[in-house]
Image (tube, rainbow, N blue to C red):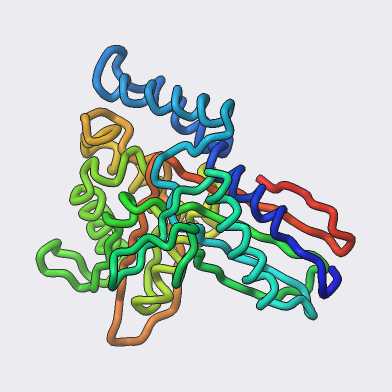
Amino acid sequence: MSATESYTETFVELIRRASTELPADVLEALQEGRAGEEGGGLACIALDTVLTNVDMAREDSAPICQDTGTPVAWIHYPVGVSTRRLKEDFGAAVREATSRRYLRPNAVNTLTGANTGTGAGRGIPFLHFEEWDEPRIEVRMILKGGGSENVGAQYKLPDGRLGAGRDLEGVRRAVLDAVFQAQGKGCAPGVLGICIGGDRVSAFEETKRQLLRPLKDTNPAPELAELEERLLAEGNELGIGPMGFGGKTTLLAVKIGVLDRLPACYFVTVSYMCWADRKAAVSIDEGGEVQWLS
């Protein structure tokens, strides 16, 4: 890991993989959802279309969705590696990936409405840096689409409208309300990243970190593992279904994290990820050898 080494091309490939190849756990969940829907119904047709699109994107190395989303990455690095250089390389990778059409030019100046044309801008990509003791760099990334981002939500408990108190039952009520309010607008079936506690900023960051988890892993906290399973089952009983057409497959997974909070605050924060649950990861060792991670 020399001071002059560039990781731009590796990051471009990371972006290409996330944008064009749906992870195996997500594909499996979509296939299971398709098998559980009534043949010939709108839910079945919607999932058939989704699965066909996934195959075409992989074969053509083309974006799975026209909204290629915001690149959000967590970068772990060893002592002595420059985070400034990593940031520069990742920004360059976003611009190059956009020029190669793995990403859409998504960055828009909020004040003028002008598109930057490069896919990068203020806050895009959004990078989290964490130093660790491993002698390698590890990058885990999601591409967070705008439609699903629009239906994210944050609740302040207690919430009298929902009858939600400051406990896991209150959390359950808040999360199910978020799913119900989203209906099909988040491009269901979706994956929920949830944070209990934290402040308004740290909580949303944690919800997106939860989206990195494999869909079928088990939460190490038994009470949260039980709540994840219950929310998944009850969310799928709402009848919203794929793209809001009705059906049994509204959610693919629910992932919950917890942060400590101030006594005055009890937030329940929900990030909604659409069916195009795009994520990719890479490890780069001391010698520059690249290993692609699941």
Which quadrant, please, contains the N terminus? bottom right
Q: Is residue 129 above or below residue 255?
A: below
Name the residue located 58 percent from the left edge and 45 percent from the top edge.
Answer: 100
Image side of residue 137 versus residue 92, left or right = right
Q: Residue furthest top?
A: 40
Q: Toward which corner of the image does residue 284 lie, by quadrant?
A: bottom right
Image side of residue 163 versus residue 127, left or right = left
**Nearest the camera: 182 or 227?**
182
Q: Is residue 226 visible?
A: no
Q: Residue furthest bottom?
A: 263
The image position of residue 179, as x and y in percent, is: 25, 49
Name the residue located 66 percent from the left edge and 78 percent from the top edge.
Answer: 84
Q: Is residue 220 above or below residue 190?
A: below
The image position of residue 175, as x and y in percent, is: 28, 56
Name the residue located 52 percent from the left edge and 25 percent from the top edge.
Answer: 55
The image position of residue 42, as x and y in percent, is: 24, 21
Q: Is residue 294 visible?
A: yes
Q: Toward which corner of the image does residue 203 lie, by quadrant?
A: bottom left
Image side of residue 46 versus residue 216, left or right = left
Q: Is residue 185 above or below residue 46?
A: below
Name the residue located 62 percent from the left edge and 62 percent from the top edge.
Answer: 92
Image side of residue 114 versus residue 120, left or right = left
Which quadrant, please, contains the C terminus? top right
The image position of residue 11, as x and y in percent, is: 66, 55
